[in-house]
Image (cartoon, rainbow, N blue to C red):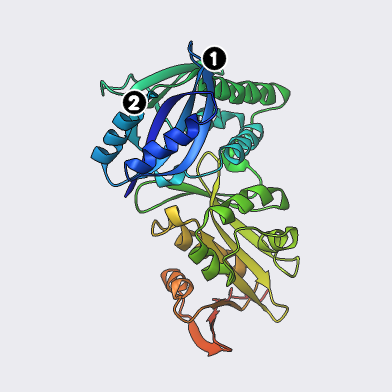
Amino acid sequence: MGLFRLHVQIEDRPGRLAELAAAVAGAGCNIVSLTVLGERGPDGSVTDELLVDAADQATATSLADQIRAAGMGCTLAVRADADELRDPVTTALALARRVAGDPDAAPRAMASLLHATLQDTPPLDADAHAHQMRVFGQDVRLCRGWPFTATEVSRAAVLVELAELCAAASDRPDPADEPGSLGLVLLGNGSEVELRVATLSDGPLVAALHARCTPSTRHGRFLNPSPALSSDELAELLVGASGDGVALLALTPDGGHAVGLATLDPDGAGGAALGVLVEDAWQARGVGTALVRRAVELATESGWSELSAFAHPGNLRITRLLRRSGLRPTARLVDGLLEVHVALPQHAVTSP
């Protein structure tokens, strides 16, 4: 199965969405996300963007034909990435927050918002679509495999306006100087994530990350598959149960959403508990390894002597991550759970 994007022009009248759902089910596909783009055509129809689970391109193309046969317009059926399964409102607010802190990030934020890429030259692919916007007096070209809608372009324009307002109000900061930033990390598949120290204001990003994870991933991290976090649980992820902990976030380079989180919580005995959560679509890319390596560095710099973690006996992810960070963890069963401990390297102390 794979994800495919469809743009459907559907009449705004009772029962029409049910007919669309029936067409999708009849093609053996499943709707996993629906976004109303909000543009009415001459006949009063509204454009909806669907992400559907389909067996292959042929199935997605057949689905588009069935939607048209049901009297609804369907303009495309193209592949989509798994990391696009995120709440659009949370993403837009996170991108606005990023642009407010770093106006120079506006082009990358627009590209993320529109699921597009930035290109200096017109696309060579005849099926590609490009849209040009003016940012800080320079032309920025956005490209993707399907048309840009007027609603999407207007959303991107708001980010540009925000960036220009923030730039006019203060000197534009260097992204590398952003408080808490630990820099970009290149992953094994060529993509990048930004690591930075989390703050309590990152609660919405972390809550969205937690909700996007599958029950099995949440159960492996929290021993509880619940998709909702209480305010106390959310705070514990950001500053630990002790309130003196530190959390590291892995974010997309534009800051649009968090894909991983590592929490260090001091245990009061010279060590710290470590917890790691990585969104399913970003697992096996090196995000967890990058987070743990940086967490180990921070723990060592803080003078903690060891790290500990708890997991189910069959869950060896945390031990693998620690080994990839150059450490040698030990584990034992305690009350049915795997208790992992690893000694940290100590800074040499030189005599004056």
Residue 137: mark in rendering: 1
| Residue at the image position 58 percent from the left and 78 percent from the top | 308
Residue 192: mark in rendering: none
| Residue under numbered circle 2 | 68
Image quadrant where residue 57 sits: top left
> Disc 2 on helix, strand or loop?
helix
Image quadrant where residue 27 sits: top left
Q: Nearer the viewer, residue 188 or 157?
A: 157
Tell me where residue 257 appears, x and y as whole percent: 55, 45
Q: Is residue 114 at all visible to an observer of this figure?
A: no
Nearest to viewer (mark 2 / mark 1): 2
**Mark 2 → mark 1, Cα distance in angstroms:** 42 Å
Q: Is residue 229 above or below residue 35?
A: below
Q: Nearer the viewer, residue 118 or 136?
A: 118
The amino acid on which the numbered mark 1 sits, given as a three-letter code, is: Gly
Q: Is residue 23 above or below residue 137?
A: below
> Disc 1 on helix, strand or loop?
loop
Tell me where residue 89 appears, x and y as whole percent: 60, 37
Of the numbered discs 2 and 1, the one sitting upstream in the chain is 2
Position of 289 with respect to 264 (left or right) is left
The single residue placed furthest to the front in the displayed view is 15
Mark 2 packing: few (<14 Cα in 10 Å), some, or many (20+)? some
